[in-house]
Image (cartoon, coloured by chain):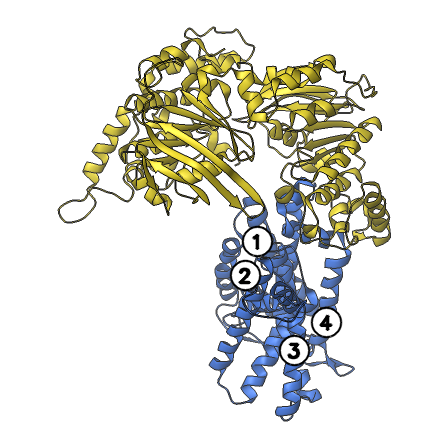
Chain colours: A blue, B yellow
Amino acid sequence: MTSFALPRGLDRPRLADALQRYGVYAAVLALLVFNGIFTDHFLTADNLRTQLVQVSPVVIVALGMALVIGTEGVDLSVGSTMALSGALLPLYLGYGLLPSLLVALLAGVVVGLVNGSLVSLVGLQPIVATLALFVGGRGLALVIADGQLKQIENTDLLSLGTDSVLGIPVVVLIAGVLAAMVAGLVQRTTFGRQLVAVGGNRRAAALAGLPVRRVLIGVYVICGVLASLAGVLATARLTASDPSSLGNLMELSAITAVVVGGTPLTGGSVRVLGTVFGALLMQLLHATLVTHDLHDSTAQMVQAGIILVAVYVARERRAR
Amino acid sequence: MAPPEAAAAQSAPPGPDGPGDPAAPPAPVLEAVGVSKRFPGVVALDDVSFTLRAGEIHALVGENGAGKSTLIKILTGVHRPDEGELRLGGEPVAFHRPHEAQQAGISTIYQEVNLVPLMSVARNIFLGREPRTRLGLVDFRRMHRETAELLGGFGITADPRRPLHTLGIGTQQMVALARAVSVRARVVVMDEPTSSLEPREVETLFRVTGDLHARGISLVYVSHRMDELYRICDRVTVLRDGRLVHTGDLADTDRVRLVSMMLGRELARVRKEAAEGHDDGRTPAAEPVLTATGLSRRHLLDDIGLDLRPGEVLGLGGLLGSGRTETAKALAGALPLDGGEITVGGRRLRRISSAAAIRAGISLLPEDRKAEGIVPGLSVRENIVLAALPRLSRFGFISRRKQDRVVDIFMKRLRIKAAGPEQKVGELSGGNQQKVLLARWLCLEPRVLLLDEPTRGIDVGAKAEVQTLIDELAAEGLAVLLISSELEELVEGADRIVVLRAGSVAGELTGDDVTEGGLLTVLAETAPDAVPQPAPEAGDPPDAPAQAEAEAEAEDAPGAEGEPDGVPDPRKEDPR
């Protein structure tokens, strides 16, 4: 079937397979090498720290998204969920950081319950089910915040965005710990394996007596909670709650990270480390292009190209 | 054996003149000559010829994989034959697209109605050829008028403005027929039109087919229901494994012979084998482990009851569409039921769900291995432990050690050939995939194992292994329900056979009656309630009232069947 000659033992499907599996790591490495040679002051601790801090909210949201996509779904409401938790946060800061944090995360739970119920109980398609809260969630956030940007003065919350432990920013630490937890969830727990099975063949999973509905609802709840946590951290970094712009286009960044990381949109597989590196790749790519004085719009087009390659590779592999 | 009035119903139209008629048969309207079609890995049709004469109703029969649908798709321009040619009215034709076949006067009515549900009845009938006003706009008035006339001609009164989906399935099918006729079809292909119809809707359908027949339109009629075939069809073509087995007048072909041709068993051989004994030394327990009564589901199952004893293999026989798979699914809690109860080990299942059935010890090996069985992207190990995950975990965390032990045991016992437990199941052969699925269920230590076509599509070696395994499992005290389209497998594997027809139990074979001949006889028998009685014998069969009522209604108001309001349409509550 190959239309052009390739080295023996490396036919097209296997090449595609390898690309989907390891492409993202190779790309990140290549970018780092490129920048090490051609970009001044790129491979410095300061710059890398900045990049990691910036990518952390995307990573956190993308982890949840990866789980949802693993079940053959998608969650468009993550950006709005961030806005919602950002809007709720300042309302309860008077009681201290912990209560307001809990309220913000509770918003994520509620969003996840609604999404999950619409998908699993009502049987809506995920893209439609989550579109409701994509639109409604941000509206609700604006109502809650009265359409206003609110400055954050709680020092506990602000320190979440600025503190470091052993030179690593707290935000990055949280993202790293969450990535490890999600990886453990997927690989080591019954829930995680059931999630993958549901995504791989839902009818077979149902016939095998798996709690398909519970798994689906659980997945959307986890995704909602992660998004709301990302909203809290982003608010802390911004030092202001801004429900009108917080998390805008986040759903697209998260989906991009997941897809570029090698998780197929057809479900049945979740690549946690790939997702983290997918987010990193997009972040580094953007930074590289911007530092080389390419306009933001050019950066977006290059990103679009990467996404196309990732999707094409996934398609090629499936077509075997 | 044909219903008595079948001949009477068919005598009015000009078509069949009886088998021994000396007159030359009517000219063929549509012919397929020496047609072959290959798909990757399969020969779907192998040098098949098919002749449809003008004005006849031609039955096309065969079991799964016989090549019926491929032949239909070739006749209707969906596929193009690799070899052979199509002739329409004697002239060779080649259809590149379904549209061209339609233009040439060949209409198809699929099992699932292929119309636009949200459009009105009239728009559906005139789709793509709407009458225009002088301004070039759609002439709705004319369209509605002509639709009403057309439907009226079939004895249907339905508002042409109504969206199609608000009508009952039967009426929708009439609309599809009306469309076929109004595009001046010469040939109408009907693929299992009655599978989702109520008995009285079937009557209306037959009236319409009779009407088409009278107009000289030829019909190709695909169905598995013997009674229907003998009632309305003139000739029959039997396909098996992509080859033509038989073409001839239906009146000359008795039912047992037709069934044996479909299933590929020669009667003479069957009778000889029957003389040989049937003994495998199993002694089933006296008390059933599973008892099911009154399993019912609209259109699919009608009051099915059976019981399964530990240590026996109960065969479930029946032709395609008789409800075998549905029965197995119902027992495994995977088919929502309208009524009925299932008792396992003396305890009644309160909620019928897959999880509940599995907890009670019922495991189902589904028919469609790819769609309902394997999770192709997961490893052999994960596919085996899928259903047992909670049992092999502590506090929600999986234990690889426990998994590996179980997987090792079953990979050895079932001789699963894979590179290792971590190989993806999607990469294995069909036989090994099937063994993986068997392992998935066996590691749950079930009390009842339901096997739906366990050896379909697997190679001969694996097949024998699976059959041996079934025997071993029964000998170990498991209750096994075996579904197989292969008579030989069913008769050899089963201690007892329950035969289904049209969703209800048609008979049971026990002891020395478990032979292919005995099975064929039951399969070919007339279904008593499928023959419309000229005078309904109310209260004769136990579940007759509803049936008799429907028939009485059909006779009282023959014009009203199509009226949408006359159909209470409980289908809306149907979760499908």
Mark 3 is surrounded, within 10 Å at the Cα level, by few (under 14), some (14 to 19) or many (20 or more) other residues, namely: some
In the rendered structure, find residue A28 and report the number of the disc placed on it. Answer: 3
- Distance between the Cα atoms at labels 2 and 1? 9 Å
Do labels 3 and 4 touch, CB within 8 Å? Answer: no
State the residue at coordinates (34%, 27%): B218
- Distance between the Cα atoms at labels 1 and 3? 33 Å
Task: Pinpoint residue B323: horizontal percent, then vertical percent.
Answer: 58, 26
Q: Earlier in the sequence, mark 1 or mark 3?
A: 3
State the residue at coordinates (52%, 12%): B528
Mark 3 or mark 4, which is nearer to you? Answer: 3
Q: How many marks?
A: 4
The amino acid type of the residue labelled 3 equals Val
Helix, strand or loop status at disc 3: helix
In the rendered structure, find residue A77 and report the number of the disc placed on it. Answer: 2
- Distance between the Cα atoms at labels 4 and 1? 26 Å
Task: Pinpoint residue B500: horizontal percent, then vertical percent.
Answer: 60, 21
Q: Nearer the viewer, residue A25 or A199?
A: A25
